[in-house]
Image: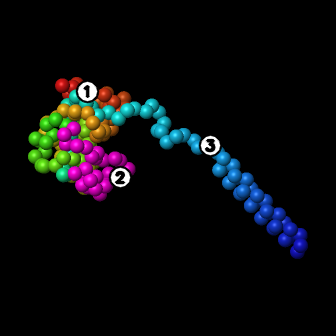
């Protein structure tokens, strides 16, 4: 009986000591990475000067209202729309026809990318209007460029295409 108690006590002490050593080692372990994604880091592309296709999820009087509306939209694990000032795109206000200073927008260089995004938005029950004409980006906030496939099939589209150049 005493032998069994000694064995149980030894196992308990051994397990607790092992847990303490592992906790101490984990506390001193260096943090791996620094939060940056793996691979090359690219600067956000605003497409300044390019003629882009805008997919619009709504126009709002203020940034706060646009952000609140954007927060209610579901796109699964994807970003969805970006809150941008309407003045960021030349020709935007004339095509939308709604008053407001901020819009939910995702910008594209290709018709295929814009259509695919609009279909995705619709599949989640979100509004998605593709503006009938391209708008000129005046630079500013990131609005999603780089999320569509390159027409040559080599990966994401990371630069202008002939249709987006003025």
Residue nearer the viewer, 75 or 152? 75
Give the residue at x 71% y 57%: 19
Q: Where in the figure is residue 90, as x and y percent of width and height?
A: 16, 35
**CA distance separating discs 1 and 3:** 44 Å
Image vertical order of residue 89 relative to residue 19, above or below: above
Q: Which residue is mark 2?
A: 76
Sequence-earlier tag: 1 or 2: 2
Residue nearer the viewer, 116 or 97? 97
* Residue 159: quarter of image: top left
Residue nearer the viewer, 31 or 8? 31
**CA distance separating discs 3 and 2:** 33 Å
Give the residue at x 24% y 47%: 104
Which residue is at the far right?
2
**CA distance separating discs 1 and 2:** 29 Å
Q: Is residue 106 visible?
A: yes
Looking at the image, residue 64 sits to the left or right of residue 97; the answer is right
Residue segment shown in magenta: 62-88
> How many residues crowd mark 3 within 10 Å: few (<14), some (14–19), many (20+)?
few
Residue 68 in the magenta stretch? The answer is yes
SS of the residue under disc 1: loop
Q: Which residue is mark 3?
A: 30
Q: Specify the quadrant that holds the N terminus.
A: bottom right
Residue nearer the viewer, 79 or 69? 69
Q: Which mark is residue 161?
A: 1
> How many residues crowd mark 2 within 10 Å: few (<14), some (14–19), many (20+)?
few
């Amino acid at each position: 009986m005493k032998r069994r108690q000694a064995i149980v006590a030894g196992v308990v002490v051994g397990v607790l000591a092992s847990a303490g050593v592992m906790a101490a080692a984990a506390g001193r372990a260096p943090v791996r990475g620094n939060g940056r994604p793996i691979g090359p880091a690219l600067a956000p592309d605003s497409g300044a000067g390019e003629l882009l296709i805008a997919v619009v999820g709504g126009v709002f009087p203020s940034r706060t209202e646009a952000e609140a509306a954007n927060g209610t939209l579901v796109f699964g694990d994807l970003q969805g729309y970006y809150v941008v000032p309407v003045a960021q795109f030349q020709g935007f206000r004339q095509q939308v026809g709604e008053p407001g200073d901020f819009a939910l927008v995702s910008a594209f260089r290709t018709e295929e990318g814009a259509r695919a995004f609009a279909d995705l938005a619709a599949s989640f029950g979100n509004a998605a209007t593709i503006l009938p004409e391209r708008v000129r980006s005046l630079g500013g906030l990131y609005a999603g460029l780089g999320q569509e496939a390159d027409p040559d099939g080599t990966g994401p589209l990371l630069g202008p295409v002939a249709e987006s150049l003025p």
